[in-house]
Amino acid sequence: MESLVLESGIKNGISLSPGAAKEITRLMEEQKPEENKFLRLGVKGGGCAGFTYILDFDIQKEGDIVYNIEGIKILVDPMHELYLAGTEIGFQQGLNSRGFIYKNPNASKTCGCGESFG
């Protein structure tokens, strides 16, 4: 299977905050995805701002861009890379909200919940 493997998610790629990396590692230990499944980051049409983020466990597909960040293998479809380049995934844990947050330099607008963008 041919793919592009990137050792760092800095600059034009994908990056994880320390909190997000810790939470993803915790989820992987808790959910124990199958051996051939890794974290997939993507987008799909919909949401109140136009696109919604996808963050789930999936198998690697031919042509995927693969990021290896702090031992976490992240898969990105090359078609989605256009929308995700430079995105930092963070994690917030508070009284009013808990979850992953996306700092996407390509987003011209975002919704209030932070899970969709335009």
Image: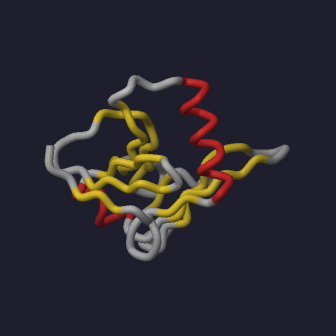
Q: Residue at x 36, y 50 (%)?
A: 43
The quadrant the N terminus occupies is: top left
Q: Residue at x 44, y 65 (%)?
A: 9
Q: In the displayed structure, would residue 87 be above or below residue 39?
A: below
Residue 107 on image: x %, y %: 45, 69
Residue 111 seen by the camera: no
Q: Pick whichever, 19 or 84, lies toward us.
A: 19
Q: In the displayed structure, would residue 118 be above or below residue 30?
A: below
Q: Is residue 27 left or right of residue 11?
A: right
Q: Pick whichever, 99 or 112, lies toward us.
A: 99
Q: How is the image coloured?
A: secondary structure
Q: Pick whichever, 1 or 99, lies toward us.
A: 1
Residue 61 on image: x %, y %: 21, 41
Q: Residue at x 53, y 54 (%)?
A: 70
Q: Is residue 5 left or right of residue 115?
A: left
Q: Is residue 19 left or right of residue 102?
A: right
Residue 14 on image: x %, y %: 44, 63
